[in-house]
Image: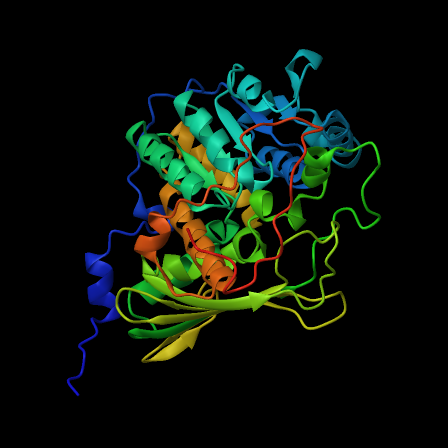
Amino acid sequence: MEKKEVPSRRSFLKGSTGIGAAATAFTIIKPELVRGAGKEKLKAGIVGVGGRGRQAIVDLINGSENVEVVAAGDIFEDKLESNLNWIRERHPAVWQRVKISPEHKFIGFDAYKKVINSDIDIVMLTTPPGYRPMHFEAAVEAKKHVFCEKPFGTDPVNVRRFMAAAKKSEELKLTVVSGAQRRFSADYMETVRKIQEGAIGDIVAAYAYWVGTPVIQQPKGRDPKWGDMTWQHRNWYSYVWICGDQIVEQHLHNIDVINWVMGTHPVKVVATGGAVWRPRDEVHGNIYDHIAADFEYPNGVRLSSYCRQFPRGLHNNVSELVVGTKGRSNVHDMGERKANPYVAEHTALVNSIRGDGPYINHAMAVAESTMTCIMARESAYSGIEVTWDMIMNSKLDLMPKAFDYDLKMEVPPLPVPGQYKFI
């Protein structure tokens, strides 16, 4: 049999169009669209004030003295108020720069529009990920810089919508920083640079894991006053349309690291999964509790990926491993962590906008990692091999076509390979 020639890791990188994640991969520029020139503080607004949103406010303000938060929106008033109160009580120093007047607290499904149209420079998108493409598109249209929590969508149609807005954000020289915080962790950044320079030779295999505990937001079940859409938002991690399943919402972190190292996305995947311990009830929704995936990159390198959510007290493993011809790396062993990456990403955001540091736009890179995860999920659900071309042409659109607190929402059954159809 004729041996197929596989290009070396370094020669592959030279021809790759993938976006590197180290800040040094970008040209230093002074974006013209920012109004926060000189010593004037940048103004930020946030869409989605849940647990992740409140911490993003804290990290943003701790990350730079040149920013304050002046607007906030959520679909639930109790969530917005309770999480702002959490900041006030737990982080009084941060609260000094949270200057959200009552007129700039917006409630409802259109709250994102009101936040984006406020007098702000930065919009922070921290709602459940199903909404990310819609909100990001609106932010780019309004020419706002963006902190965008990962993942960047839950289905192919809407991630492509995100990608179109990502291209426009690049043309406008908008700063876009993702919540894939490993890209701002100095130990990861230095190690990825060294791997790409050949520190462990040519890459021959990669492994990614997220084995941890489940996210059960409403263990006591539904409040009788909540309609279907209200319930699914308050218990969002259990529903595919709004969370994307664990491989998209959580395991993206690890898969994104491997895409970053490889400089591109895989070309195909075969995956398997299911729900073993998750009960078939509305608290646990219609997501799997494990997915294993075998990805292949353009140069033939394989990524073995495994995510699982066990009940508490059992095995856990959140890690990455890259194997080369001259050694192996956990992708953070050749550098030193210098700062909390959750804070560092916001420091980089503000510095990029102000021109005090390298220009950063991770919109397309993390969108590709999001699509990589969706590609594997759809393979596991359907039981077929899914290629990059297939997922980029998929017609799957999970977003509701109407939004109302009491909207009736049918829940699709747990996907069964052979019955679930890839579209």
Query: At x 33% / y 56%, what residue is drawn?
Result: 388
Residue 212: give x, y in percent of width and height.
66, 64
Q: Quadrant of the N terminus?
A: bottom left
User: Quadrant location of residue 223?
Assistant: top right
Placement of 147 over or under 299, stated as above or below = above
User: Quadrant location of residue 400?
Assistant: top right
Please state which of residues 338 and 75 is positioned toward the viewer in this rendering: 75
Residue 183: give x, y in percent of width and height.
45, 51
Residue 366: give x, y in percent of width and height.
42, 47
| Left or right: residue 40 compared with residue 5 | right
Specify the farthest residue to the left. Answer: 2
Specify the farthest residue to the top. Answer: 103
Is residue 215 something one can see in this rendering?
A: yes
- What count of labels does the image hold? 0
Query: At x 20% / y 59%, what residue is drawn?
Result: 14
Query: At x 52% / y 53%, what residue is drawn?
Result: 248
Residue 270: give x, y in percent of width and height.
42, 68
Query: At x 38% / y 57%, what residue is drawn?
Result: 260
Is residue 50 something one can see in this rendering?
A: no
Please state which of residues 170 and 402 is positioned toward the viewer in this rendering: 402
Please state which of residues 222 and 336 is positioned toward the viewer in this rendering: 222
